[in-house]
Image (cartoon, rainbow, N blue to C red):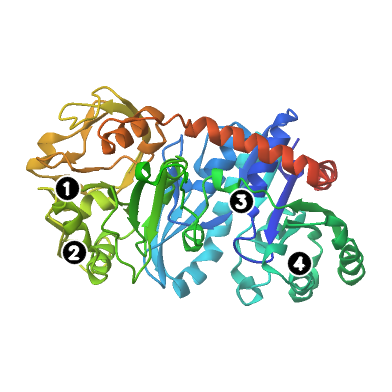
Amino acid sequence: MSVQSVPALMLQGTGSDVGKSLLVAGLCRAYARRGLRVRPFKPQNMSNNAAVTDDGGEIGRAQALQARAAGVATTVHMNPVLLKPQSDIGAQVVVQGKVLTSAKARDYYRLKRDLLPKVVESFEIMASDADLVLIEGAGSPAEVNLRASDIANMGFAEAVQVPVILVGDIDRGGVIASIVGTHALLSEDDRRWLKGYVINKFRGDVSLFEPATGIIAETCGLESYGIATYWPNAHKLPAEDGVALEKAGRYHRNSGEDAGKVLRIAVPHLPRIANFDDLDPLAAEDDVELLVIKPGQVIPSNCDLVLLPGSKSTMADLRFLKEQGWDIDILAHHRRGGHVIGICGGYQMLGRMVHDPNGVEGEPGSEAGLGLLDIETVMAGDKTLRKTRGMTIGHDAGLAVGTPVDGYEIHMGQTDGPDRARSWLDLSGVSDGAMSPDGRVLGCYLHGLFGSDDFRHAFLGRLRSGDAHQTTHFEAGIDAALDELADHLEACLDLDGMLELAKSRA
């Protein structure tokens, strides 16, 4: 079978955050369980939540989750264009897993036309080893002002001639108008690729929506492929981007059984926060209350741990942290005997200084860090991208030496200083991290370490003075959630019809 005839189906949305990523993940798992070789694909993604691939590049974490759902190794070709915002108007452009350039929005708009061949090339590579390719659009095809250079929605659908299903989020309200309005805004040429729709996040009596299907069919001629009722366990799967952090309560947990035993972990919400799914395993623990501290809020004085997350722009976020007065809160927390941990960019912020002599992140310069670790970071050298595993080593400060860890590194910068002598991780034979003399401040470059159950349980037990009772198995929980999601979509949607639609591309 030629790649031009491999079954493929594209899910586009009436807007951002309508649930496309989770739908594709659930469909990947459902069709893979039917014995199909399924491959996820997203032409263009914008997210600082990136994953290191098995072939040594980076893609959006949503595509990594979809690959996991499909039971296949990750590759840069699953998300050939990844935009990683560095400012309100500019982003780093990653093409087929490697950084191409940094561009402002207007410059990228012109650049996109030249990227379409790379996007099509990656799609054909994915299709060459697949029975079915499930494609996720970005934003909405109704952004017709950007259609001329589009590579993410109808521009891509036209380039590879793939049928499209539109996803509408009824939880937002106005879903009929969003579907009909999107159809109305599309050109006649683009409408030919749009074949049907799915309603997502429906609550209540599904039969009440039945009259709407007739209205949509009469107005647009689109076929319904089902109504996905609200799935309450979406929080068990990693979110795609920072929209999740904007939702109140996204990370709040409280068992309510014994407030005295609840661990409170505060995380400053940095503007360029990256790889924030590092927080998910902590939030999954029943006795952890994970508080995302928004701008204008104070870091609570009664928290047990302050966690500084990764950042796409360490120096800019460090300045923002100081502007919010969070540096004062963190230093006071430490003086009271509190614990602090920094991951990647957060690790760099814990040091005495961060230097960017070559303007890797923006204007060249230096910025004073929090000084909780006796280290300095220089933004220089090649970008580190690698999956890795290892274990905790000496200077355990209450952590059992030899506890296994598993994760990935994705960062710029080299960090050194006296506190590096107290490195606390061995990653494939390379020492990583730094620890303060009192053992209450830790930093490292390893993303995903809290997903390692033994480490997470030991670390949280350390905050309780050794009283560790966690039994959560985070990674196993993700696979169980993917199976549950697949079951849910099998019951709600017309998966047989969607597969036939994908085959109609032949």
Return the x and y of residue 228 as percentages of the image width and height: 75, 51
Image quadrant where residue 184 sits: bottom right
Measured Cα–Cα span from mark 3 to mark 2: 38 Å
Q: Is residue 190 visible?
A: yes
In the rendered image, residue 145, in percent from the top left (x then y), is placed at 62, 77
Amino acid of disc 1: Gly
Q: Is residue 484 left or right of residue 456?
A: right
Residue 380 shows in the view: no
297 sits to left or right of 149: left
Mark 4 / mark 1, whichever is N-terminal: 4
Kindly report the distance in space between the C-alpha atoms of the residues bearing marks 3 and 1.
Answer: 41 Å
Specify whether 404 is left or right of 241. Answer: left
Residue 190 is marked as 4
Residue that carries the numbered disc 3 in the rendered image: 21
- Mark 3 or mark 4, earlier in chain: 3
Residue 387 pos. (x, y %): 38, 35
Position of the N terminus by quadrant:
top right
Q: Secondary structure at mark 4?
A: helix
Q: Which residue is mark 1?
A: 337
Callout in the foreground (3, 4): 3
Percent across and percent down for residue 159 are: 68, 57
Please tell me whether mark 2 or mark 1 is closer to you in this view: 1
Which residue is found at the position 85% from the left and 45% from the top? 497
The C terminus sits in image quarter: top right
Q: Which residue is mark 2?
A: 328
Residue depicted at x 79% and y 54%? 227
Disc 4 marks a residue whose amino acid type is Asp
